[in-house]
Image: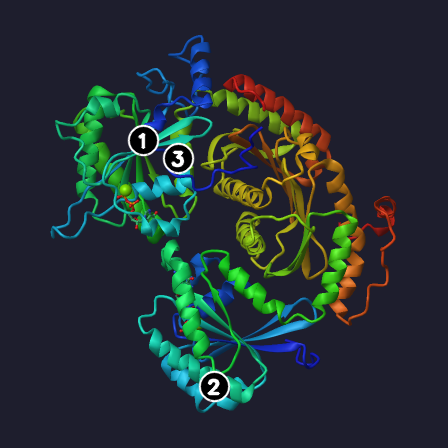
Amino acid sequence: MASLLTTPARREKPEESGAWRNKTPAILTLERFMQDQTDPENPNPSPKFHTGRLPNNRSGDGKPRLLLMGQRRQEAHPLISPRRSGKSSISSVVFHKMPPAETLFLESTARIQKDAVHSFMDFQVWDFPGQLDFLDPAFDVDYIFGEIGALIWVIDAQDEYLDALMRLNNTILLLQQHYPSINIEVFIHKVDALSEDYKFDIQRDIVQRTQDELSDAGYENAPVSFHLTSIYDHSIFEAFSKVIQKLIPQLPTLEGLLNILCSNSGMEKAYIFDCISKIYIATDSSPVDMQSYEICSDYIDVIVDVSEIYGWDRPGRAAEEAECNDQEAESVIRLQNGMILYLKEINKYLVLICIMKEESIKKKGLIDYNCGVFQDALAQVFGLQRT
Amino acid sequence: MDIIEKKGKKKKVLLMGKSGSGKSSMRSIVFSNYVAKDTRRLGATIDVEHSHVKFLGNLTLNLWDCGGQDAFMENYLQHQRDHVFANVAVLIYVFDIESREFDRDLVTYSAVARALSENSAGARVFCLIHKMDLVQAEYRQKLFEERSSLLKERSEGFDIVVFATSIWDETLYRAWASIIYTLIPNLSIIETYLRRFAEIIEAEEVVLFERTTFLVVCHVSQQGLGNPNDDRFERISNIIKTFKQSLSRFTSSPKSAPQFTEIELRAPRFSLFIDRLTSNTYILVVVKPGESDLNTAKMNVKIAREDFERLDVTGDGKKPTRTRESSSRMELEAEDDAGRDAEY
Ligand SMILES: Nc1nc2c(ncn2[C@@H]2O[C@H](COP(=O)(O)OP(=O)(O)OP(=O)(O)O)[C@@H](O)[C@H]2O)c(=O)[nH]1
Ligand SMILES: Nc1nc2c(ncn2[C@@H]2O[C@H](COP(=O)(O)OP(=O)(O)O)[C@@H](O)[C@H]2O)c(=O)[nH]1
Ligand SMILES: [Mg+2]
Ligand SMILES: [Mg+2]
């Protein structure tokens, strides 16, 4: 198996435009899954997070597509470049492992960048340059909105946002008329520099203004959600998790499997993460607390970083290694307070991370067995091969 | 702090450089479990902040973090010259890469080097060209070379070592590990013992880290196995220290607490574990993939603990009493029960 933990895709360059059209195994897998669904229009009994709608896939390639947009605020002085809300930074940090501080060097985006992320599902991040007027009639709106699952609208919380809000509201109204199934996810961004109080004041204000506008237009139930985000902490990943979970029809099944795993193996919490983006795809139904989510996400960093250091190809080792090569990576960390962190690679893209007490890991055989069962079930859900 | 420490084991380390160059930031990250972000809160250092850092049992660093504002510098160089520059083991001089007055920085640096040569001629001098993260990657090397050669001309006869550093990446750990490496007594004995140990367990690599700073103390690697990542030791320091911060948030325990007792990773191409070795050190062992190599190595670490503890704490230069030069791996495994550490 070409394991992610053997040759991690660190800071991969965004795909050349055009490459995103090629179907990767993951897309094909997803496609297969869609075809297998008996009732694709209503795939899940009582979804908890999922909206119950399948991702928009007019073109039939089944890619749940995210679209990243933001405000355009021209400074009064023509030579001052427009304020940039942080779209390129977000996609670089989340999908290309760029350290947040390095985003200071990002150049202004001049044209639409389509950035395909080959993860367990294919995320399309379209980064629009701040200056582009997408409501321009010359613009092919249908081409852009025809196949996305979620529109992420980035608002710079450190800047004047009234103008941005107006544009957001116009966009929501437009989408509600023509593409009502698109989830609208508002990232109130760069909140790292703001005090707790101020942060929530801004959120309240933005939510209020948006809702007023929507109910005036008669769209009270538009699928709009708000997230406070920053690239300097986990909030951006947490927000992406929520956005993406809504686009995964299999979510309730995954949660069910994780619940079974937890209760049969004495685990307190279990997550499935997408290893490349550190977005969590699913977790068991015990409440998510930020601390456990963060530690799992940091755990992935440790494992990927260490694997990058020691996972080099040893010449002359081929024969000995062959026997261990189809082994998925596995890791255990024993904490001072008696807790155990456990990580297991599930397939090329996904890792399982569990938090448990010391007693549970003593029955390592049971855990190995249950994880194997879990892996097989997951493979069935996604139609993926284990290796 | 223990004042009755034996003389010679306390090493005076001067940390100097212009105000805002990042001296206190580095010190806080390396010795006080700050993360890079936390340093934004630091105010300017007033006069000298002294701290004593116990490192590997018998070595104590007496760190002088010298506030860098002009008035303070003048004071050190004039009124307190004999006091500040006497008995110095190491001078670490920090240059801010963003400084707009490098020429003026050089003048001050020269004056400091002169004062040092008059009072502590045997001191070692390290220059850190700092905040390199602010320079785009492709220009770093060139800028570093330019600045280094200028510094070497102005060092008043000291044979200096220059590092490019940033608190935002592992370069910080590389510089500090190299500096402290020169101060640890009996290192060659520890190293010999570690090499022996690595051979016995057939490890690809064995690395010893100091417990609180997670700086590399020493490392041995299997002959002819060229890991292409030359910066791996400082990267590990950085990875683990960052993760310890996360763990302290997760467990709501103080940042200075040890946080973890063991990390284990079985990857397709290698197995690795990090374990407490002595009260002052962690050991990292990398072995071939597969269950048996990993388990053998883990058992042997438990057995070897006492020997390492003795080397580390007394530092008396004596060879370890229990040598295992003739032991085969099977014998070592058989001894496991007797050697098991009560710590677990
Ligand atoms: N970008 C960047 N900033 C740094 C780095 N190191 C330190 N800083 C920042 O520089 C500022 C000043 O750092 P200090 O450590 O207080 O400086 P100092 O040398 O102790 O200054 P004095 O105590 O006045 O002599 C802080 O805001 C740090 O966050 C670095 O490597 N890169
Ligand atoms: N403080 C802070 N700054 C951010 C954050 N995200 C992005 N930025 C900064 O915002 C600036 C513009 O970002 P960029 O991604 O180029 O904006 P774009 O034009 O929307 O693509 C950069 O200097 C980033 O470093 C954040 O979460 N917090
Ligand atoms: Mg951009
Ligand atoms: Mg200071």
Q: Is residue B285 above or below residue B105?
A: above
User: Which residue is tagged 2?
Assistant: B114
Of the numbered discs 1 and 3, the one sitting upstream in the chain is 1
Q: Which chain letter goes with mark 1? A: A
Q: CA distance from mark 3 to mark 2?
A: 57 Å
Out of A95 and A149, give the one closest to the viewer.
A95
Q: Which chain letter goes with mark 2? A: B
Where residue B141 sits in the image (x, y, percent)?
A: 42, 60
Residue at (38, 29) in percent of width and height: A123
Q: Which mark is residue A17?
A: 1
Q: Amino acid at mark 1?
A: Ser
**The image quarter in which residue A218 lies:** top left
Q: Is residue B127 visible?
A: yes
Camera-near label (3 vs 2) is 2
Residue at (54, 61) in percent of width and height: B174
Left or right of A62: which side holds A383? Answer: right
Rendered image coloring scheme? rainbow
Mark 2 residue's CB less than 8 Å from ligand 1: no
Quadrant containing ligand 4: bottom left
Label 2 near label 3: C-beta < 8 Å? no
User: Which residue is tagged 3?
Assistant: A240
Q: Amino acid at mark 3?
A: Phe
**The image quarter in which residue B197 lies:** bottom right
Q: Secondary structure at mark 3?
A: helix
Camera-near label (1 vs 3) is 1
Q: Is residue B139 above or below residue A161?
A: below
Q: Secondary structure at mark 2?
A: helix
